[in-house]
């Protein structure tokens, strides 16, 4: 079935929410002096999702790539790197379960027990 652009427009693009979003974007562009055809985008230094506002002090003009790369990261905070996954067999999982049970009986929280058990498994596999 072919895509029905008219229905799609009526359903989403002409909705009050979509219009308000475009209006807010255009207002921010005007605050920064970005004109039609300018490829730069408005970036919120402190993301709106993290409590940042639409004031001029929180806006900057950046390239599309820069804005996508930053996403909703906060300035000055390091990005968390990807964790190295430890290849685990079923035996490893059973071993971790037993260690966690023992550690939790000793008063460790579930999170602490897991972290300790995983570090013990790493040492076991490396050594």
Image: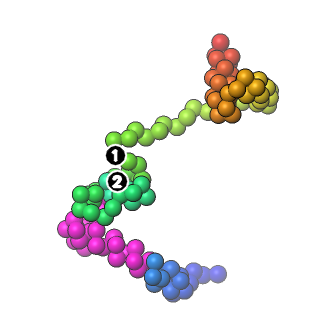
The N terminus, quarter of image: bottom right
Residue for point 60% across, 81% down? 2
Q: Is residue 24 magenta?
A: yes
Note whether residue 61 is visible.
Answer: no
Residue 22 spot, x, y in % from top left: 37, 75
Mark 2 — residue? 46
Question: Dot 2: few (<14), some (14–19), or many (≥20) neighbours within 10 Å?
Answer: some
Dot 1: element? loop
Q: Residue furthest top?
A: 127
* Left or right: 63, with 126 as reference point: left
Q: Residue furthest front?
A: 107
Residue for point 40% across, 73% down? 21
Q: CA distance from mark 1 to mark 2?
A: 7 Å
Q: Residue 36 — which label?
A: none
Question: Dot 1: few (<14), some (14–19), or many (≥20) neighbours within 10 Å?
Answer: few
Residue 98 spot, x, y in % from top left: 79, 26
Residue 34 spot, x, y in % from top left: 22, 68
The C terminus, quarter of image: top right
**What is the span of residues highlighted in magenta in the rendered image?**
18-43
Colouring: rainbow
Q: Is residue 26 magenta?
A: yes
Which is nearer the eye, 68 or 43? 43
Residue 106 spot, x, y in % from top left: 72, 23
Sequence order check: which comes first, mark 1 or mark 2? 2
Note whether residue 22 is visible.
Answer: yes
* Left or right: 86, with 63 as reference point: right
- Are discs 1 and 2 less than 8 Å apart at CB? yes
Vertical arrangement, residue 109 with respect to residue 6, above or below: above
Vertical arrangement, residue 16 with respect to residue 99, above or below: below
* Left or right: 112, with 73 as reference point: right
Q: Residue 75 — which label?
A: 1
Residue for point 28% across, 68% down? 28
């Amino acid at each position: 079935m072919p895509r029905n652009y008219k229905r799609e427009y009526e359903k989403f693009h002409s909705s009050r929410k979509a219009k308000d979003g475009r209006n807010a974007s255009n207002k921010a562009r005007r605050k920064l002096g970005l004109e039609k055809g300018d490829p730069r985008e408005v970036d919120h230094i402190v993301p709106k999702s993290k409590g940042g506002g639409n004031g001029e002090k929180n806006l900057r003009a950046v390239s599309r790539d820069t804005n996508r790369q930053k996403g909703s990261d906060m300035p000055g905070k390091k990005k968390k790197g990807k964790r190295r996954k430890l290849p685990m067999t079923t035996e490893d999982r059973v071993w971790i379960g037993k260690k966690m049970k023992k550690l939790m009986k000793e008063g460790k929280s579930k999170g602490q027990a897991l972290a300790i058990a995983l570090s013990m498994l790493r040492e076991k596999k490396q050594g």
